[in-house]
Image (spheres, grey):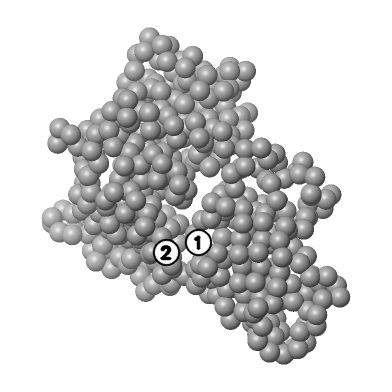
Amino acid sequence: MSDIAIKVENLGKLYRLGEVGTGTISHDLNRWIAKVRGKEDPFTKIGEANDRTSKGASDYVWALQDLNFEVKKGEVMGIIGRNGAGKSTLLKLLSKVTKPTTGNIKVNGRIASLLEVGTGFHPEMTGRENIYLNGAIMGMTKREIAAKFEEIVDFAGVERYVDTPVKRYSSGMYVRLAFAVAAHLEPEILIVDEVLAVGDAEFQKKCLGKMKDVSTNDGRTVLFVSHNLPSLKAICDTGVLLRNGVLEQAGGILDIINLYNGLHTKGVSMLTNIRYLTNNLEILYLSINDETVSDFVLNTNKIKLKVQVKVNVPIKFDIDLHIKKDDFYLASFGGFTSMDAELLQPGVYNFEYNIEIPPMRSTRYSIDIYFTDPFTCWWAVLDHAIMVDLVNEKAGSFINNPGVDKWGSVLLIGEAKRV
């Protein structure tokens, strides 16, 4: 195992849905008796695959099951999969935040993890104190940490606040300092989850460059989870694709990305996620940039929306897009049709919308689609239709965007047409 940094063998993690723990004393007792007798945990036999889109017959679900792969020293590995595929659970197991249900993990080297904003920081301690605390936890001496201190603070760009308790930091400052600490305190293995999306575009670019640098020049191993496929393609050598807690494939990053792009089209149809508020309008077909499934990420601000609707009573038809960040509504976009729009008679209609989202702060947003009339009577709602990574280094916040009025609404740039 001299050239292997991480080796995962038959790894599995079983959870009980709905409650913490196994739920009853009898369950715990049955597990203990099985363990004493050297037998398999009885509840692993009834665990089901982790398909979050369907209701199962068992209260037990395999977040991960039978994973086997290796990561070589100096390799940058991307971990890819839809939401709920088991990516974060895998990183928690590798970081020893939680224990596996089955299998084992062999790690050759010191690990630094960045799994969520503020990982490993004590909120009452200052940035300076947290740097020294994290270094001590990793087994570094005070002199070794001091030699890296200025470099860490400079990379994070928080020099003015380094002696301020981190509980007063913004989420962006938190992740800046946390990544700087994790990357500069010389871990052999660096594990980074999706938290970099909290930072601005300039800092994300800086972090990606640092991860590539520590791998190429320092020979360290990096595991990186992201939905940003161009970033994965730019810095990763290899990748693993997870699907419903199972390892679909491991290999070169380009092969894994291509496989993922083919697999996610087999996901949940957007039509299954529509909430109908009346029976006046039915959505027969819906695609975004020619994708007909939910839960995927677009790295663009240009959207082509195709809709086929069935009108059951005479109505006027329009769409609105509502952009959210962490489930908080930021702005509403829409108004392709005016109040004197065509009154649609009962029948089937096809529409095509070419949409460009105005400049907004570079980060990840979710978009809801509302099917409305000009008076904002809702016919149907599609929640979390898409995730969009907006990268526009020259754009400021949507708040100071001159196209946004005092109600936080702006007309989309684009056109709509009947086809």
Near mark 1 (Cα within 10 A), the count class, few <14, some 14-19 or many ≥20, is: some
Determine whether the residue tagged by mark 1 lies in a helix, strand or loop.
loop
Q: Is residue 9 left or right of residue 255?
A: left
Q: Is 140 situated left or right of 271 in this image?
A: left
The C terminus appears in which quarter of the rendering? Answer: bottom right
Q: Residue at x 84, y 49 (%)?
A: 406
Residue 224 percent across, percent down from the top left: 39, 42
Q: Residue 388 at what x, y percent from top left?
A: 57, 53
The residue indicated by pointer 1 is 295
Residue at 68 percent of width and 89 percent of height: 347
Residue 307 versus residue 44 in the image, above or below: below
Query: Is the residue under label 2 in contact with that under label 1 (CB below 8 Å)?
Result: yes
The answer to whether residue 135 is above or below residue 101 is: above
Q: Amino acid at mark 1?
A: Asp
Determine the image quadrant of residue 5: top left
| Dot 2 crowding, Cα within 10 Å, few <14, some 14–19, many 20+ | some
> Nearest the camera: 21 or 411?
411
**Numbered label attached to residue 5:** none
Q: Residue furthest right?
A: 340
Depth check, mark 1 against mark 2: the one in front is 2
Q: Is residue 22 visible?
A: no
Q: Is residue 386 left or right of residue 222?
A: right
Q: Position of residue 8 (x, y in %)?
A: 22, 46
- Residue occupied by mark 2: 264
Question: Taking 66 as reference, is 310 above or below it?
Answer: below
**Disc 1 from disc 2: Cα separation:** 8 Å
